[in-house]
Image (cartoon, rainbow, N blue to C red):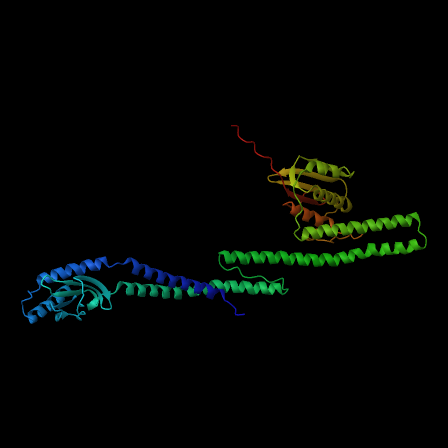
Amino acid sequence: MIKRHLHRQIYATIIGCLLLLVIITSGTFALVDDDRFDRKILQVTAQLTFRALPPATASRAEQARAITELGQEIGMALTLFDANKELIGAYGKPSRRPPPDAAANKWRRHGLGPSWRIRLPDNRWITVRMEGLGRPRPILGLLILLIGVTLAIGLGSYPFVKKLTGRLERLQKGVDRFGTGDLSTRVDVEGFDEIATLASSFNSAATTIERLVNSNRQLLANASHELRTPLARVRLGVEMLKEGGSPARRAALERDIAELDSLIDEILLMSRLDTGHRPALNETVDLLGLVAEEVAHYDAAILDGTPVELLGSTKLLRRLVRNLLDNATKHGRPPVDVKLQQSGDFAVLRVHDNGDGIANGQRENIFEPFTRGQGKQNVPGYGLGLSLVRQIAEAHGGSAKFIQTDSPGCTVEIRLAAKLPEEPKPAL
């Protein structure tokens, strides 16, 4: 299969359109140009020449000399025939003698140019020709002009077309490298047109895909590691049950299975959110009521807030609040202060504990999956809670971050896109 270069196709299209323009213009000119102006000039010239000629009774030499002088003065080719259609004289290349059945007046266009032939009252014949002496032909001149324009545009447009398609070729090479598995591939954004927008979109998509692939790789590696412990306990519990299980062993096995089920549930939820799966955010959620319900399960949590409504998923928002409260109670110290308010277009939820806090260098890492703070390795959990919090917040058009306060401990701030109240319609 022959490779078709885009710049050659664009260039060929431009040249083809210009050639088509030449053909259509020339054809139109030939059709609409009925030579009425030329005919009128030649007719008038023939009449004036007749009036200036000596009579037919003058000598042939005198008539020939008169034709030559008249032709020089008016700048046209003249040919004079006698009544028998024999040549008397001519200025310029003589025209063909009138045929036996020649009409009295005849307009014609031929190789020597447009001409007008008339029969004089004394039966002599005279032919007046415009282009016999080098008058430019309009159609030929137009053709030469259009062909020149075509060549000029063709030569001038080739570098532009080549540059345009060169950028596309470089973009294609970047896509090919990315397709072979080099996820770090990025292309240069050249210019400010649609191709530059396409290159920028490719870079953005490549960054997202690289992040998702790396995140999934890390998630898979960490999940396989975290799953080993509960699976080993389950296996040990099953073996011990074979020897006769006590109620305590059965209860421990049930806890291990529940722990394993919870871990798998969090991993699956994180995977769905991380791969761009957008949950249905079509529920009107009373966020203050939801937070109050979750705070009621914690004796050390205190809520202070104002009513806020937003469109979202009740299930995911409940998981977000529960993870925040679990993290604050496990890793901090009571009391846990929860504050909810609306700020502009966002609902702002802050959860503050009075623990030892988190070092500045670890505040962003703490949102990564399976990450725990220093000295917290023995605290129950998998290190997925805050990672899910950030993903759920981003799925609701918001963000999650640690903020610095004057109080000891640490504060997590969640911003969620709030549902603004509709403006009342003006009264009619």
Number of on-image labels? 0
Q: Is 130 rendered above or below residue 340? A: below
The answer to whether 242 appears left or right of 284 in the picture is right
- Percent x, y of residue 38: 21, 60
User: In the picture provided, is 129 more to the left or to the right than 392?
Assistant: left
Q: Determine whether, in the image, residue 326 is placed left or right of residue 202.
A: right
Image quadrant where residue 155 sits: bottom left
Q: Residue 425, relative to residue 75: is it above or below?
A: above
Picture layout, residue 112 above or below residue 425: below
Q: Residue furthest top?
A: 428
Q: Which residue: 69% across, 51% down? A: 272
Give x and y (percent) for residue 254.
86, 49
Which residue is painted at 56% across and 65% down in the image?
Answer: 173
The answer to whether residue 216 is visible is: yes
Using the rendered view, name the quadrant where residue 318 is placed. top right
On the image, the x and y values in percent for residue 70 come to 11, 65
Q: Nearer the viewer, residue 145 or 305?
A: 145
Q: Quadrant of the N terminus?
A: bottom right
Q: Position of residue 224 (x, y in %)?
A: 77, 58
Q: Of 188 and 47, which appears nearest the observer?
A: 47
Decide if residue 139 is on the left or right side of residue 342: left
Q: Is residue 359 visible?
A: no
Q: Which residue sits furthest right?
A: 244
